[in-house]
Amino acid sequence: MTADAVRAYGARATEYADLLGHEDAVAAPDRELVLRWAAERSGPVVDVGCGPGHWTDLLRRQGADVEGIDPTPQMLDLARERFPACRFRAGRLEDLGVPDGSLAGVLAWFSLIHTPPDEVPAALASVARALRPGGSTLVGFFTGDGVEPFDHAVTTAHRWPVDELTARLAEAGLVVRETHARTDPGVRPQGAIVADRAA
Ligand SMILES: C[S@@+](CC[C@H](N)C(=O)[O-])C[C@H]1O[C@@H](n2cnc3c(N)ncnc32)[C@H](O)[C@@H]1O
Protein backbone atom coordinates (compact mmCIF):
# COMPACT_ATOMS: atom_id res chain seq x y z
CA MET A 1 0.00 0.00 0.00
CA THR A 2 1.40 3.39 -0.93
CA ALA A 3 1.88 6.20 1.58
CA ASP A 4 -0.77 8.16 -0.34
CA ALA A 5 -3.28 5.35 0.09
CA VAL A 6 -2.56 5.13 3.83
CA ARG A 7 -3.11 8.89 4.08
CA ALA A 8 -6.34 8.62 2.09
CA TYR A 9 -7.69 5.90 4.39
CA GLY A 10 -6.52 7.84 7.42
CA ALA A 11 -8.44 10.92 6.32
CA ARG A 12 -11.66 8.95 5.85
CA ALA A 13 -11.35 6.34 8.58
CA THR A 14 -14.21 7.67 10.71
CA GLU A 15 -16.47 8.05 7.70
CA TYR A 16 -15.64 4.50 6.59
CA ALA A 17 -16.30 3.11 10.05
CA ASP A 18 -19.65 4.92 10.33
CA LEU A 19 -20.80 3.80 6.90
CA LEU A 20 -19.41 0.29 6.54
CA GLY A 21 -17.58 -0.72 9.68
CA HIS A 22 -20.33 -2.47 11.60
CA GLU A 23 -22.24 -5.70 11.58
CA ASP A 24 -25.43 -4.18 10.16
CA ALA A 25 -23.55 -3.07 7.05
CA VAL A 26 -22.41 -6.62 6.28
CA ALA A 27 -24.41 -8.41 3.56
CA ALA A 28 -25.90 -11.70 4.75
CA PRO A 29 -24.10 -13.89 2.15
CA ASP A 30 -20.75 -12.30 3.09
CA ARG A 31 -21.35 -12.90 6.77
CA GLU A 32 -22.33 -16.50 6.10
CA LEU A 33 -19.27 -17.16 3.92
CA VAL A 34 -16.74 -15.51 6.21
CA LEU A 35 -18.11 -17.11 9.38
CA ARG A 36 -18.35 -20.55 7.75
CA TRP A 37 -14.76 -20.25 6.49
CA ALA A 38 -13.56 -19.09 9.93
CA ALA A 39 -15.40 -21.90 11.72
CA GLU A 40 -13.36 -24.39 9.69
CA ARG A 41 -10.07 -22.91 10.93
CA SER A 42 -8.30 -24.34 13.92
CA GLY A 43 -5.50 -22.04 15.07
CA PRO A 44 -4.47 -18.42 14.62
CA VAL A 45 -6.23 -16.28 12.03
CA VAL A 46 -5.23 -12.83 10.79
CA ASP A 47 -7.82 -10.37 9.48
CA VAL A 48 -5.51 -8.37 7.20
CA GLY A 49 -6.75 -4.94 6.22
CA CYS A 50 -9.14 -5.11 9.15
CA GLY A 51 -10.06 -1.43 8.82
CA PRO A 52 -12.30 -0.42 11.74
CA GLY A 53 -12.28 -3.97 13.08
CA HIS A 54 -15.84 -5.25 12.69
CA TRP A 55 -14.85 -8.51 10.97
CA THR A 56 -12.17 -9.15 13.59
CA ASP A 57 -14.80 -8.72 16.28
CA LEU A 58 -17.30 -10.99 14.51
CA LEU A 59 -14.66 -13.72 14.21
CA ARG A 60 -13.58 -13.29 17.83
CA ARG A 61 -17.18 -13.60 19.01
CA GLN A 62 -17.49 -16.79 17.01
CA GLY A 63 -14.52 -18.15 18.95
CA ALA A 64 -11.67 -17.56 16.51
CA ASP A 65 -8.13 -16.90 17.71
CA VAL A 66 -8.00 -13.75 15.57
CA GLU A 67 -5.85 -10.67 15.27
CA GLY A 68 -6.74 -7.66 13.09
CA ILE A 69 -3.91 -5.93 11.25
CA ASP A 70 -3.91 -2.81 9.08
CA PRO A 71 -1.37 -0.30 7.74
CA THR A 72 -3.57 2.74 8.46
CA PRO A 73 -2.98 4.06 12.01
CA GLN A 74 -6.34 5.84 12.19
CA MET A 75 -8.13 2.60 11.34
CA LEU A 76 -6.26 0.82 14.13
CA ASP A 77 -7.14 3.59 16.61
CA LEU A 78 -10.82 3.26 15.73
CA ALA A 79 -10.72 -0.54 15.82
CA ARG A 80 -9.12 -0.55 19.29
CA GLU A 81 -11.60 2.02 20.58
CA ARG A 82 -14.65 0.22 19.17
CA PHE A 83 -13.63 -3.35 19.92
CA PRO A 84 -11.42 -3.34 23.05
CA ALA A 85 -11.77 -7.11 23.46
CA CYS A 86 -9.95 -7.68 20.14
CA ARG A 87 -6.26 -7.64 19.32
CA PHE A 88 -5.07 -5.22 16.63
CA ARG A 89 -1.63 -4.26 15.35
CA ALA A 90 0.05 -2.55 12.42
CA GLY A 91 0.79 -4.78 9.45
CA ARG A 92 0.05 -5.38 5.82
CA LEU A 93 -0.42 -8.10 3.27
CA GLU A 94 3.14 -7.82 2.08
CA ASP A 95 4.49 -8.31 5.61
CA LEU A 96 2.07 -10.04 7.95
CA GLY A 97 4.58 -9.98 10.80
CA VAL A 98 4.21 -13.66 11.67
CA PRO A 99 6.57 -16.63 11.30
CA ASP A 100 6.29 -18.56 8.05
CA GLY A 101 3.88 -21.48 8.24
CA SER A 102 2.20 -20.23 11.41
CA LEU A 103 -1.35 -19.22 10.47
CA ALA A 104 -4.48 -21.32 10.13
CA GLY A 105 -6.19 -18.54 8.21
CA VAL A 106 -5.78 -15.18 6.51
CA LEU A 107 -8.92 -13.16 5.84
CA ALA A 108 -8.17 -10.53 3.18
CA TRP A 109 -11.58 -8.96 2.86
CA PHE A 110 -11.36 -6.09 0.35
CA SER A 111 -7.81 -5.31 1.45
CA LEU A 112 -6.07 -6.53 -1.72
CA ILE A 113 -8.11 -4.15 -3.88
CA HIS A 114 -5.67 -1.24 -3.53
CA THR A 115 -2.57 -3.26 -4.37
CA PRO A 116 -1.28 -2.45 -7.87
CA PRO A 117 -1.81 -5.56 -10.03
CA ASP A 118 1.91 -6.09 -10.63
CA GLU A 119 2.42 -6.21 -6.85
CA VAL A 120 -0.39 -8.70 -6.19
CA PRO A 121 1.80 -11.80 -6.76
CA ALA A 122 4.19 -10.66 -4.00
CA ALA A 123 1.28 -9.96 -1.63
CA LEU A 124 -0.23 -13.41 -2.29
CA ALA A 125 3.17 -15.06 -1.90
CA SER A 126 3.39 -13.41 1.53
CA VAL A 127 -0.01 -14.84 2.47
CA ALA A 128 0.93 -18.30 1.19
CA ARG A 129 4.20 -18.24 3.19
CA ALA A 130 2.39 -17.32 6.39
CA LEU A 131 -0.10 -20.20 6.13
CA ARG A 132 0.60 -23.51 7.79
CA PRO A 133 -0.06 -26.70 5.80
CA GLY A 134 -3.84 -27.01 5.56
CA GLY A 135 -4.24 -23.28 6.28
CA SER A 136 -6.56 -21.20 4.17
CA THR A 137 -7.08 -17.69 2.86
CA LEU A 138 -10.38 -16.02 2.01
CA VAL A 139 -10.06 -13.07 -0.33
CA GLY A 140 -12.93 -10.64 -1.01
CA PHE A 141 -12.68 -8.22 -3.95
CA PHE A 142 -14.52 -6.37 -6.71
CA THR A 143 -15.00 -8.21 -9.97
CA GLY A 144 -14.94 -7.00 -13.56
CA ASP A 145 -14.29 -8.14 -17.11
CA GLY A 146 -10.61 -7.28 -16.92
CA VAL A 147 -8.00 -6.26 -14.37
CA GLU A 148 -8.79 -2.58 -14.37
CA PRO A 149 -8.56 0.42 -12.06
CA PHE A 150 -11.57 2.35 -10.87
CA ASP A 151 -12.22 5.38 -8.70
CA HIS A 152 -12.95 3.83 -5.33
CA ALA A 153 -14.34 6.39 -2.86
CA VAL A 154 -11.10 6.37 -0.83
CA THR A 155 -8.28 5.70 -3.29
CA THR A 156 -7.71 3.92 -6.60
CA ALA A 157 -8.67 0.26 -6.54
CA HIS A 158 -8.67 -2.55 -9.10
CA ARG A 159 -11.36 -4.94 -10.27
CA TRP A 160 -10.32 -8.51 -10.90
CA PRO A 161 -12.04 -11.20 -12.97
CA VAL A 162 -12.50 -14.21 -10.68
CA ASP A 163 -10.46 -16.40 -13.07
CA GLU A 164 -7.52 -13.97 -13.05
CA LEU A 165 -7.27 -13.78 -9.28
CA THR A 166 -7.78 -17.53 -9.09
CA ALA A 167 -4.75 -17.92 -11.39
CA ARG A 168 -2.63 -15.57 -9.23
CA LEU A 169 -3.53 -17.55 -6.09
CA ALA A 170 -2.58 -20.80 -7.82
CA GLU A 171 0.72 -19.25 -8.92
CA ALA A 172 1.36 -18.40 -5.28
CA GLY A 173 1.19 -22.13 -4.58
CA LEU A 174 -2.33 -22.25 -3.15
CA VAL A 175 -5.12 -24.65 -4.07
CA VAL A 176 -8.30 -22.78 -4.94
CA ARG A 177 -11.22 -24.53 -3.26
CA GLU A 178 -14.17 -22.15 -3.74
CA THR A 179 -15.01 -19.20 -5.94
CA HIS A 180 -18.00 -16.91 -5.51
CA ALA A 181 -19.35 -14.00 -7.52
CA ARG A 182 -22.51 -11.99 -7.20
CA THR A 183 -24.04 -8.63 -8.00
CA ASP A 184 -26.30 -7.11 -5.39
CA PRO A 185 -28.59 -4.22 -6.34
CA GLY A 186 -26.89 -0.84 -6.13
CA VAL A 187 -23.39 -2.08 -5.38
CA ARG A 188 -20.39 -3.13 -7.45
CA PRO A 189 -20.13 -6.78 -8.51
CA GLN A 190 -18.00 -8.64 -6.03
CA GLY A 191 -16.19 -11.93 -5.71
CA ALA A 192 -14.62 -14.12 -3.08
CA ILE A 193 -12.10 -16.93 -3.32
CA VAL A 194 -11.08 -19.55 -0.77
CA ALA A 195 -7.61 -20.96 -1.39
CA ASP A 196 -5.71 -23.41 0.80
CA ARG A 197 -2.13 -24.38 1.41
CA ALA A 198 -1.87 -28.10 0.74
CA ALA A 199 -1.93 -30.17 3.95
C1 LIG B 1 -11.95 -1.35 1.80
S1 LIG B 1 -11.18 -1.33 3.37
C2 LIG B 1 -11.69 -2.94 3.99
C3 LIG B 1 -11.76 -2.97 5.48
C4 LIG B 1 -12.46 -4.22 6.04
N1 LIG B 1 -11.69 -5.42 5.70
C5 LIG B 1 -13.87 -4.32 5.52
O1 LIG B 1 -14.21 -5.32 4.87
O2 LIG B 1 -14.64 -3.39 5.75
C6 LIG B 1 -9.50 -1.62 2.98
C7 LIG B 1 -8.60 -1.71 4.19
O3 LIG B 1 -7.42 -2.37 3.78
C8 LIG B 1 -6.32 -1.69 4.23
N2 LIG B 1 -5.25 -1.97 3.26
C9 LIG B 1 -5.02 -1.41 2.07
N3 LIG B 1 -3.92 -1.94 1.48
C10 LIG B 1 -3.48 -2.89 2.33
C11 LIG B 1 -2.38 -3.79 2.31
N4 LIG B 1 -1.50 -3.81 1.30
N5 LIG B 1 -2.22 -4.64 3.34
C12 LIG B 1 -3.12 -4.62 4.37
N6 LIG B 1 -4.15 -3.78 4.46
C13 LIG B 1 -4.34 -2.93 3.44
C14 LIG B 1 -6.73 -0.23 4.36
O4 LIG B 1 -5.95 0.47 5.30
C15 LIG B 1 -8.17 -0.37 4.76
O5 LIG B 1 -8.32 -0.37 6.17
Image (cartoon, rainbow, N blue to C red):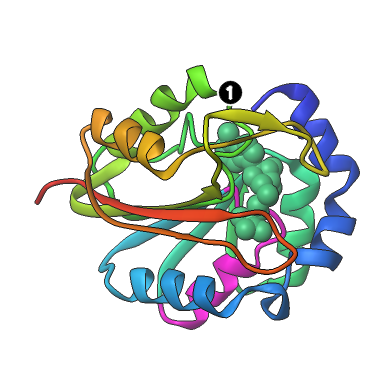
SS at circle 1:
loop
The residue lying at 12 percent from left, 47 percent from top is 198
In this picture, is 187 found above or below 29? above
In this picture, is 129 found above or below 54? above
Residue situated furthest left in the rendering: 199
Query: Split into 4 quadrants, where in the image is the N terminus?
Result: top right
In this picture, is 140 found above or below 19? above
The residue lying at 36 percent from left, 40 percent from top is 163
Residue hosting label 1: 116
Q: Is residue 153 left or right of residue 124?
A: right
Q: Quadrant of residue 104?
A: bottom left
Q: Whole-percent x and y of residue 150?
A: 72, 34
The residue lying at 64 percent from left, 73 percent from top is 26
Q: Whole-percent x and y of residue 61?
A: 51, 82
Residue situated furthest front in the rendering: 145
Q: Is residue 175 left or right of residue 88?
A: left
**Residue 88, can we see it?**
yes
The magenta segment is 49-63
Q: Looking at the image, which is closer to me, 171 or 164?
A: 164
Q: Looking at the image, which is closer to me, 55 or 160?
A: 160
Q: Looking at the image, which is closer to me, 4 or 132?
A: 4
**Residue 99, can we see it?**
no
Q: Quadrant of residue 86?
A: bottom right
Q: Looking at the image, which is closer to me, 185 or 70?
A: 185
In the rendered structure, does residue 171 fall within the stretch colored magenta? no
The residue lying at 82 percent from left, 57 percent from top is 16
Callout 1 amino acid: Pro
Q: Is residue 120 left or right of residue 105?
A: right
Q: Whole-percent x and y of residue 194?
A: 33, 55
Q: Whole-percent x and y of residue 111?
A: 58, 44
